[in-house]
Amino acid sequence: MMNRRTFISKAAPLALAPGSLGFAASNASKNPAADPIVSDGPLLKRELFTSPVIIESLDLFERDGTWFVRARSTDGAEGWAVSHDKKMPLFYPIFLKVVAPHMIGKDARDIDQLVDSVFLIGSNYKMQGQPFWVPVASAEFAILDLLGRIANQPVGELLGGIRRQQIPLYIANNHREYGAEESLKRIVESVESIDAKAVKFKLGGRMKVIDQVPRRTERLIPMVADALGDRCTLYADANSSYVNADKAIAIGRLLQSNGYSFYEEPCPFDYLEETKKVADALEIPIAWGEQESSQWRFKWMIENGGAQIPQPDIIYYGGLIRSLRVAKWAERRGLDCTPHISGGGLGFLYMAIYASCCPNPGPFQEYKGVNRSFPWESPGVDFKIEKGLMPAPLGPGIGIDIDPDFLKQARQVQ
Ligand SMILES: [Mg+2]
């Protein structure tokens, strides 16, 4: 287990020498008023594009419960994204009335600035949260696909460069309704299903302290360690269960003594003070952030030791660029930034793009399955999950092609 001391020893020299990390030159230290969100410069490699890519349209389509975004440029190039299938039906008016109108007519090469300016204009920031950021992420994914197809490069290359071609996975489990024995059986089966080298399962009661099945948490922690500890990295997720830090710390000590490698959301996700108390009391890294929509709260939690593994959700948090900025803040502290992924849609693919280009994604990425509910193919890549690995998307754009005949039959949402 990488313990807190390892983190501190990794972090100390980095904290003293931020300029040594290979980021674009920062203006933030010279001008304290500079906006740190953009002061590192854009992530997008503009040099891959010789002329403007003007966004002509951003349109929304739905078929069989899947929500698609199409970005078109004025010279006829096209990019596609798949949005969150449960959230977009709720939030699509914000996409149609706020996000798309702001981006149409702009240069897609300014995508780094567009995800900030859409937040600031018209007091849109007052809508911060999933209802705002899911539509922004959906537009960003389609625009990045458009840019990648124009440059004939994978999105991971556009956003910093491909660093890995295989993504090691941890398989996520959710069996709170079962007792410890049945949970263990299902957890072991999930590991074997993809030969995973890492696994995560749920503790506590999800936003409440008491387990659905009494004492499941205390029993399951050592049982999973006994069954899988010699072949898997072990993670546990409390989903905001413990309002009281004392209880959260007691569970954390049990995780530590059983060799677990992170402890996710021990306290209510927005109870930062109590989460930090838990982090301060334990050696095991605290993972946190899947509900977070504020860049400043991420920054505060990273810089003040409230969490050691930030976990922005790439869709809930507003896309790849914003998530990769969190990773930069984490990298400056010698920490990993391992995103939470939304199941459904193409959440698995956006995770793989992130992990393909992020310098510090952590050793394993969250895996909840591959979505085959609509037809797509990955030219040149045998997209199989085996030996606990997912192939990085290396084709142009997002690396997959959605069947155009299927898309032709989708209804346009207006
Ligand atoms: Mg979680």
Image (tube, rainbow, N blue to C red):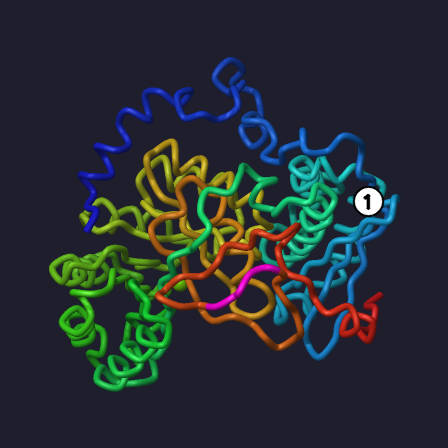
Relative to 237, 112 lies left or right: right
Relative to 310, 127 lies left or right: right
Q: State whether the magenta stretch is mostly helix, strand or loop.
A: loop
Name the residue nearer the viewer: 318 or 249.
318
Residue with the most extreme left position: 257
Q: How many C-alpha atoms fall within 10 Å of the one at disc 1: few (<14), some, or many (≥20)?
A: many
In this figure, what is the number of numbered marks? 1
- The image shows residue 270 at horizontal and vertical percentages of 42, 54
- Residue 176 occupies quadrant: bottom left
Residue with the most extreme front position: 380
Residue 242 position (above or below residue 309): below
The image quadrant where one finds the C terminus is bottom right
Name the residue nearer the viewer: 148 or 1.
148
Residue stretch rendered in magenta on the structure? 380-384
Tell me, yes or no, whether the highlighted magenta stretch contains residue 383. Answer: yes
Residue 370 position (above or below residue 180): above
Query: What amino acid is found at the position of numbered circle 1 in the picture?
Result: Ile
Q: Residue at x 20, y 75 (%)?
A: 220
Q: Which residue is drawn at 54% across and 18% down?
A: 27
- The image shows residue 236 at horizontal and vertical percentages of 28, 64
What residue would you read off at disc 1?
55
Q: Report if the beta carbon of the residue with label 1 is closer than 8 angstroms to ligand 1.
A: no
Q: Helix or strand or loop: what does disc 1 sit on? A: strand
